[in-house]
Image (cartoon, rainbow, N blue to C red):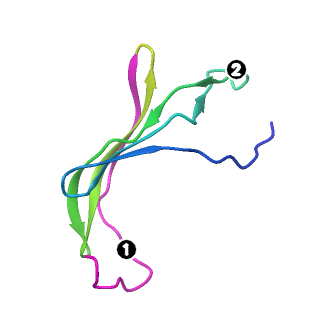
Amino acid sequence: MRFVLVAIGARLTFDDSFQLTGFVSEDRFQSEDGVHFQRYPWSTPLRDYRDFGGVRLASHGDATWIEPGGTFVYGRFDLQEVSYDAELPTAGR
C-alpha cells in the first residue's frame, strides 16, 4: 500500500457567535476490506463550547460518516483540559 500527500476540501459551518459548529469533507474514503474503497462524506459536528485558559473551544465532537443508509458515528470526543506550549496573546480572546 502506498500513501501520498493529498489535499482535501471541507465545508466549515459557524454559529451566530462565529464558533465552529461543523466540518464536512467529501474527500475521505472508507473500506471494509482494505482493498475496495468508497467515498462518503465525513463530518465532525462540534458543540458544548467552554472556556479553556481564556480560549473558547468546543468541548464535544463526533466523528461521523454520512452513508447512504444514515449517519454512522464512530467516535465521540470530550475535551477535558487543554495545555498550551506558549503564552497566548490577549488580543482576540
- Residue 45 lies in what quarter of the image? top left
Above/below status of 77 relative to 93: above
The secondary structure that dominates the magenta segment is loop
72 to 92, vertically: above or below: above
Seen at 54% across and 44% down, the residue is: 9
Disc 1 residue type (three-letter): Ser
Q: Which residue is mark 2?
A: 36
**Local crowd at mark 2 within 10 Å, few (<14), some, or many (≥20)?**
few
Comparing 11 with 64, the one in front is 11
The quadrant the N terminus occupies is top right
Residue type, label 2: His
Horizontal and vertical percent for residue 62?
36, 40
89 in the magenta segment: yes
Chain part drawn in magenta: 70-93
Q: Quadrant of residue 89?
A: bottom left
Residue, disc 1 = 83
Determine whether the residue tagged by mark 2 lies in a helix, strand or loop. Answer: loop
- Above or below, 68 against 21 in this view is above
Q: Point out residue 69 in the picture as x, y percentages from the top left corner.
A: 41, 13
